[in-house]
Amino acid sequence: MGTVSSDDKFELVRKVRADWVVNYERQDFAAETDGRGVDVILDAVGKPTFEKGLRCLAPLGHIILYGRAGGAPSPVNPLELFGKSSFALELEHVIERSTMKTDGADWL
């Protein structure tokens, strides 16, 4: 999926092989994924699109912010990312096991 801020950019994004193009000013691109989410987001816009991008990531998806054309995004609470990753389960497992051992090296 490619996102654009105006319809005159549709053709440019199609040329770089986007499967489909969404105008993020008029459409909710997260809704366009039918609940599945997307695996990788390359975000050059920043503030207007970053939070929406985080919400539509597929489990274990990645978002790469490489520009801030629309301004810097708000800070992200890392705890909000746990719902997208199995890392949260692994972290809980490590914490549980570390409290059972007196020497952290035992579980490494």
Image: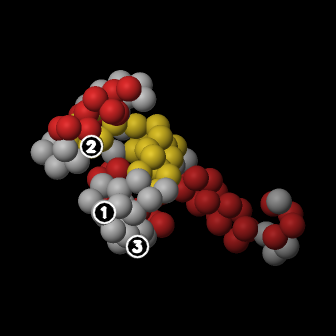
**Cα distance between the residues tagged 2 and 1:** 12 Å
Q: Nearer the viewer, residue 42 or 38?
A: 42
**Cα distance between the residues tagged 2 and 3:** 23 Å
Say what secondary structure mark 3 lies in: loop
Residue 29 visible from this viewpoint: no
Of the two numbered discs 3 and 1 in the rendering, the one whose residue sits closer to the viewer:
1
**Quadrant location of the C terminus?**
bottom right
Could you say where residue 95 lies in the image, as x and y percent from the top left?
Answer: 65, 66
Amino acid type of the residue that numbered disc 2 sits on in the rendered structure: Val
**Callout 2 crowding tier (Cα within 10 Å): few <14, some 14–19, many ≥20:** some
Q: Earlier in the sequence, mark 3 or mark 1?
A: 1
Q: Residue tagged by mark 1? A: 70
Q: Earlier in the sequence, mark 2 or mark 1?
A: 2
Amino acid type of the residue that numbered disc 1 sits on in the rendered structure: Gly
Label at residue 29: none
Label at residue 75: 3
Q: Are marks 3 and 1 in contact (CB under 8 Å)?
A: no
Residue 65 visible from this viewpoint: yes
Say what secondary structure mark 1 lies in: loop
Scheme of image coloration? secondary structure
Q: Are marks 2 and 3 in contact (CB under 8 Å)?
A: no
Could you say where residue 49 lies in the image, as x and y percent from the top left?
Answer: 30, 55
Q: Residue tagged by mark 2? A: 4
Q: Earlier in the sequence, mark 2 or mark 3?
A: 2
